[in-house]
Amino acid sequence: MAFIEEKLQTKVYGEYDVVVVGSGPAGCGAAITAAREGLKTLIIERFNCLGGMWTTGFMNPFFDSVTKLGLVKELREELDSRSQWGGFQNISFNYEYMKRILEEKAVEAGVEILYNTTFCNTICEDKTVKGVICQNIEGRFAVLAKTVFDCSGDGAVAADAGCPFEIGEDGDWKECQAMTLMFLVGNIPEKYREVGLKLKEKIVSIYEKAGKDLPFDNPYLIPVPNSHFGVIQFTHVYEQNPLSAKELTEANIELRRQIIEGFELLREYDEEFKDLDLITSASILGVRESRRIIGDYTITEDDIFGGRKFEDAVARVRFNADLHTKSNKGQHVYKVVPYQVPLRAMLPKGYNGIIVAGRCISGERRPMASYRVTGNCCQMAENAAKALAKATRENIDIRDVKFTFDLIQK
Ligand SMILES: Cc1cc2nc3c(=O)[nH]c(=O)nc-3n(C[C@H](O)[C@H](O)[C@H](O)COP(=O)(O)OP(=O)(O)OC[C@H]3O[C@@H](n4cnc5c(N)ncnc54)[C@H](O)[C@@H]3O)c2cc1C
């Protein structure tokens, strides 16, 4: 590869206690909590709303949310009070209301938000993260922080700092779970508007009749509560590198092809769906699996199948390990015994000034396929921010925090 040299003088936008990169369930959990705890907090997001897969990704339902306290409970109750909660599996929500409620909570807590701002590089000296370089309409700039929360989903901040990571099976990214582009459909037949529909039987027989190659055999129609529209979780691509811009682009193109094909076949071959409308595809590609940053502790299969508890627990996970693997074009589900996520799995090994939260924390593959769902990402980030606030108040390192407070519902 050829290189050019750039001469850069980068302006400093500001100094913060906490900078959060990425505003998915993890980023929102971290930023809202850090600000509520009195830490000066900035969140940056490359799109124009909070929520990540919750909102830009058109994801539903809100898994591992029903028994959780804290911010997850607040979101459930807030959505419910506005009649925007329920529907599919009784844990689904309206994307636009979720965006608004997250913004209300962030603004009320005092979080500074910068949308349309992309993280570019990590400022790191001697394995201590000191801030991030970002880019937006004002150009390139630095933000300095005592702690950076890497909530990018992909562990982008940690990786740029040099933190080691794992990917796929023994480093083979081809084993990463399938990517999916969610799409919204309208005019859902009345009988499915609340409960949704497992589309398996219909889609398998439609693709057989049409003589087309089926991308995934376990799709769902997931309606948004109290509406005529919803999302279809159907498209799948396999063996695309989640760390290659070129392959992510190719994945998007293939998935949009699958959307049009699937939608047209559904309308043509199924009388019930003849009036279905295609509204739009999500602006964010659904990447289930990419980097798993290596932390002080790595969550193992023994932990999740043995219901392990930890002294530094920040989340309690009930969701089974759910892998969308290429081998069967469907899902492999492995039943877990409810277990906990330790804070140490969020602290990159050997590095200071950085906490990773969300799907990119330290875990083996099957554990990741379980704690990756949104209730857990939000809860672990919320409680890690509480631990950080406690460390700040006591003027100690986050690794020395004594968990004398009850962070989670046991
Ligand atoms: C197709 C699909 C379906 C799923 N279905 C469900 C489901 O039904 N229920 C469920 O609970 N979970 C589901 N999941 C899992 C869940 O959505 C994710 O694991 C979860 O959202 C991860 O949360 P996160 O905060 O780590 O990352 P994300 O939700 O991915 O958020 C990351 C955020 O960081 C931002 N970002 C990334 N890079 C940069 C950058 N360089 N600069 C600025 N911002 C950046 C992104 O724009 C995004 O907003 C699904 C996942 C996929 C892919």
Image (tube, rainbow, N blue to C red):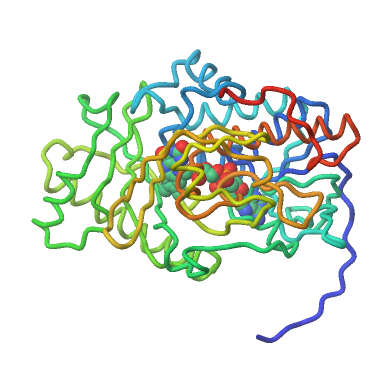
Relative horizontal placement of residue 63, taking residue 27 as reference (left or right): left
Looking at the image, residue 381 lies above or below residue 244: above
- Decide: is 98 above or below 143: above
The picture quadrant where one finds residue 40 is top right
Residue 227 or residue 290, whichever sits in front = 290
In the displayed structure, would residue 49 be above or below residue 359? above
For residue 32, side relative to residue 173 (left or right): right
Q: Residue furthest left?
A: 209
Most foreground residue, 92 or 394: 394
Residue at 66% in and 32% down: 382
User: Does residue 348 appear left or right of residue 76 in this picture?
Assistant: right
| Residue appearing at x 20%, y 63% in the figure | 213
Residue occupying image coordinates x 63% and y 40%: 342
Write down the quadrant of residue 243 in the picture: bottom right
How many marks the image carries: the answer is 0
Look at the picture and state if 210 lies above or below 271. below
Of 306 and 379, nearer the camera is 306
* Residue 287 can be seen in this image: no
Residue 39 visible somewhere in the drawing? yes
Q: Quadrant of the N terminus?
A: bottom right
Which image quarter is the C terminus in?
Answer: top right
- Residues 198 and 127: in front is 127
Across and down, in percent, residue 189 comes to 21, 30
Q: Position of residue 392 (x, y in %)?
A: 86, 34
Q: Position of residue 242 (x, y in %)?
A: 51, 63
Taking the image as shown, residue 225 lies to the left or right of residue 361, namely left
Task: Please identify the residue farthest to the bottom as the structure is shown.
Answer: 2
> Which residue is rendered at x = 52% and y = 50% of the image?
300
Residue 126 placed where, x, y %? Answer: 87, 62
